[in-house]
Image: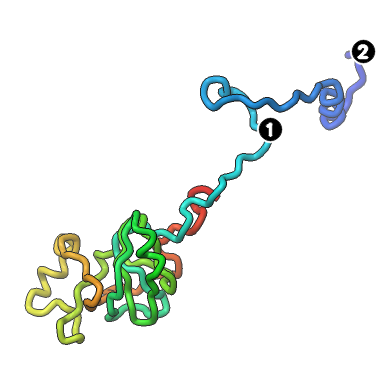
Amino acid sequence: MSHYKMISIPEAVATVLAHTPVLPAEDVPLGPAALGRVLAAPVAAREALPPFAASIKDGYAVRHADGAGARDVVGESRAGQLDAAGALECGPGQAVYVTTGAPVPSGADCVVQIEDTRPAAADGGGDGHGASAAAAASEDAARRQPPVKAGGRLMVLIAPSKVGQDIRAVGSDIA
C-alpha cells in the first residue's frame, strides 16, 4: 500500500510540466553542434522544389484527353533549359518531347514514356511500323529509336492512364 495518492496520467503530466522550465531557443550552426537538438520552429523552404511541373521520364508531354493516336511534335523541353521550355505550349493533337527532369509545357497534363510511342508513318497515317513491324514492336527497338523532333509526327500507342501521369508536381520534393 502506497502513502501517495493515485493520480491520472493527464494530472501527472500537468504536474511535471508545471515544474519543468521552458528553455530559450538558441541559434547553432549546422553540423555537430546541431546534433541531438530539437527545432524551435518548423523549417520552411524559400522556394518549392521542383519549382515547375517536371517530367519523371523521357517521353512526350501530351494532353490526357487526346488518348492514343497520332500527334504533331511541336518542340522539346530538356532538363536545365528552363527559358526555352517556358515558351512551349502543347495544344490538342500535339506533343512535346521531354527529358527526365525537364519542365512540362503548358497545356500538357501527362507524359507518355518514349517506349509507348513510335514515329508516325511519313504519309501521316498508319502507325509508322511499315514493313518492319516485328522489329519496331520490341522493347529494345523502342529504347534505341531516336526521339521524334519538332516538326515530326508521333504515334502514341498507349493512352495515358490519368492526368498527372509521370509528372512531379510543383513542390512535390520540398514544399
Location of the N terminus by quadrant is: top right
| Image quarter of residue 122 | bottom left
Residue type, mark 1 in image? Ala
Of circles 1 and 2, the one toward us is 1
In the rendered view, would you say 136 is above or below 83?
below
Give the secondary structure at mark 1. Answer: loop
On the image, the x and y values in percent for residue 175 come to 55, 50
Mark 1 packing: few (<14 Cα in 10 Å), some, or many (20+)? few
Query: Mark 2 = which residue?
Result: 3
Judged left or right of residue 133, residue 84 is right
Q: Which mark is residue 40?
A: 1
Judged left or right of residue 132, residue 32 is right
Q: Residue at x 34, y 74 (%)?
A: 159
Residue type, mark 2 in image? His
Residue projecting furthest to the left: 131
Judged left or right of residue 135, residue 66 is right
Q: Nearer the viewer, residue 134 or 106?
A: 106
Measure the alpha-carbon separation of dots 1 and 2. Answer: 40 Å
Q: Nearer the viewer, residue 81 or 95?
A: 81
Residue projecting furthest to the front: 83
State yes or no: discs 1 and 2 in contact (Cβ < 8 Å).
no
Give the secondary structure at mark 2. Answer: loop
On the image, the x and y values in percent for residue 69 come to 29, 80
| Image quarter of residue 38 | top right
Give the mark nearest the N terminus, 1 or 2: 2
Mark 2 packing: few (<14 Cα in 10 Å), some, or many (20+)? few
In the rendered view, would you say 122 is above or below 53?
below
Q: Residue at x 28, y 79 (%)?
A: 72
Q: Residue at x 52, y 24 (%)?
A: 31
On the image, the x and y values in percent for residue 92 come to 38, 82
